Amino acid sequence: MPSLTADLTLLVANAFEAAGLPPELGVVAVSNRPDLGQFQCNGALPAAKTARRKPRDIADDIVARLKDAPALSDLSVAGPGFINISVSDAEIARRVAALDDDPRSGVTPAAGETVVLDFGGPNVAKPMHVGHLRSSIIGDSLQRLFRFLGYRTVSDVHMGDWGLQMGMVISEIAIRYPDLPYFAEGAAGPFPTESPIGLDELEQLYPQASAACKADPERLEAARRATALLQSGHPGYTALWRHCMTVSKAAMERDFASLGVQFDLWKGEADVNDRIPGLVDRLKAEGVAIESQGALVIPVAEEDDTTEIPPLILLKSDGAVMYGSTDLATIADRQDAIAPDLALYVVDQRQHLHFEQVFRAARKAGIDGGMGLEHIGFGTMNGPDGKPFKTREGGVMKLQDLIRMTTDKARERMVEVGLDRESPSEEAPVATGGDVDETVARQVGLAALKYADLSNHRKTNYIFDLDRFTRFEGKTGPYLQYAVVRTGALLRKAAETGAAPGPLAPPTAVEREVMLTLLQFPDAIAAAHDGRSPDDICEHLYALAQAFSRFYSACHILSEPDPAVKASRLTVVKITRDQMALGLSLLGIDVPEHM
Ligand code: ARG
């Protein structure tokens, strides 16, 4: 079923057309003056210009044409020509009833297009930082949203496993352990099957190597040479690289598992290494790639650029493969293997120029197969000082530490507000000083982290504030989780007393508000899809939880004496619970059984 606003738009657009006015002006939206009407259409104002009529006259004309529409209960014109529209209670109830037991809560799936989601993007041998965390949280939410909408989704973690950091790490190992067989002159293997270094050492190696390369140009040169050798297939380096991959990947898998994030493909930059020589030759032969100052580049500047877009570097003068080269070859690879309609790259906004270059180069090279290529940029998660979030010591905050921190805070908060396991769920919590279930504390901590991240528009920077994120009131993950748990407990309690949800009765004002909010879910989903913006879902869920809480405090539910009214209200409770749980699942937020 199309959403209520979509149907109202159709109705009003037809009235515009019948009045000889452009139907696209008949757009209906939720009113920002709910005291005047539930919905509004402002199309009479722009229509007046072309039609040379007074906007109020046009609005009156449209209202007269809509007068007999059976679904509407009230129509009026306000100010210079705003049309206010309200829907009848019968129509509202009819539509809300259709949401009952609908696992999609009114959302119609789109056509089955294929979308590749490139997110996560951790780098081998480097610990994941908050940028990777944001990419994982936003990317996973988009993955869930697109899958829910009927797309075939293919997610790829796209590890950074082929760049200069690998050369830095290899040359650092060579300095620490020069006698390892990987470095022996002409060694061709076989090499040991056990990695000579473990995760802890690997994680120390890179920062040290990187600092050394910054301080000493010779070290940097050595790292560059090692990178070039690795990329051209040096057997010892390749074997060592494999070890780093295995060790690093195990840590990444653990990190993503604790976030509840899954990928279909665990590919990386190195996976397209074999494709690059052929691609380079072809692009050279076709004149798409040209020599420039010893390097091989693809010029991508276009005439109407307002800022300079430098060429994409395919090969450096030493033959090294660049970030852009692997990204370009990956597009060709995905086109061959998956042929997606769309590819979304959920990566830090600061890489925007890089993606602009890669996408233009792909189109110029004709390897994109016409797929949509979009960079889904995001801002940074900052510390209280306004700079990208770090540990107190100024180091990179490791994901496991971050999760531990949020879990601890969530546990503390739950004890504080009385949400430990001894509290009765459907009533106001009472602090008992009891224990908090570990799984629940973790779920609440993750909800705090994810909701805080997703509820800001992805492009804005935000400040990491665990105190605020873990509150049980206000716009937070824990508040929404608790709202779902509480409605669930209410339904259980009702069932115990033999009361069951039943047909919807005409709503009171606060009930009407919840019902109208429930009907906006498809619009929120459409907005999140169109803008690639999970914050639209966050916004909706918060509005729903608030409307529900007003309803809950104003209406009797379990204590309602009239059984028909009680059954109707229980249906509203049930649909609200289901829609909130569905919405949270699209954000990657689990709802605990009890709280
Ligand atoms: N590894 C990169 C980084 O840490 C992110 C990779 C994003 N994906 C891509 N196809 N370039 O910045």
Image (cartoon, rainbow, N blue to C red):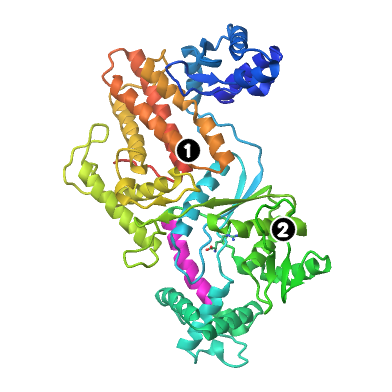
By secondary structure, the bulk of the magenta-drawn segment is best described as helix
Q: Nearer the viewer, residue 96 or 349?
A: 349
Q: Residues within 10 Å of mark 2 (few under 14, many from 20)?
A: some
425 vs 300: above or below: above
- Asked if the stretch drawn in magenta spans residue 487, the answer is no
Along the viewing direction, whichever of 439 and 588 lies nearer the viewer: 588
Residue occupying image coordinates x 59% and y 80%: 224
Amino acid tagged 1: Ile
Label 1 element class: helix
Q: Residue at x 28, y 52 (%)?
A: 409
Q: Which residues are magenta?
A: 242-258
Q: Residue at x 34, y 47 (%)?
A: 469
Query: Which residue carries the number 2 mark?
Result: 301
Ligand 1 visible in quadrant: bottom right
Image quadrant where residue 189 sits:
bottom right
Compared with 507, 144 (above or below) is: below
Q: Is residue 293 above or below residue 475?
A: below
Mark closer to the chain start, 1 or 2: 2
**Residue 194 visible from this viewpoint:** no
Residue 399, placed above or below residue 433? below
Looking at the image, the residue that sits furthest to the left is 432
Marks 1/2: CA–CA distance: 37 Å
349 relative position to 319: left or right: left
Specify the label residue 232 is tagged with: none
For label 1, the residue is 537
Residue 245: in magenta span: yes
Q: Nearer the viewer, mark 1 or mark 2?
A: 2
Residue 551: image location, x then y, percent: 34, 23
Q: Choose between 345 and 571: the one closer to the eye.
A: 345
Looking at the picture, how far across and down is residue 142, in whole percent?
A: 54, 46
Q: Amino acid at mark 2?
A: Ala
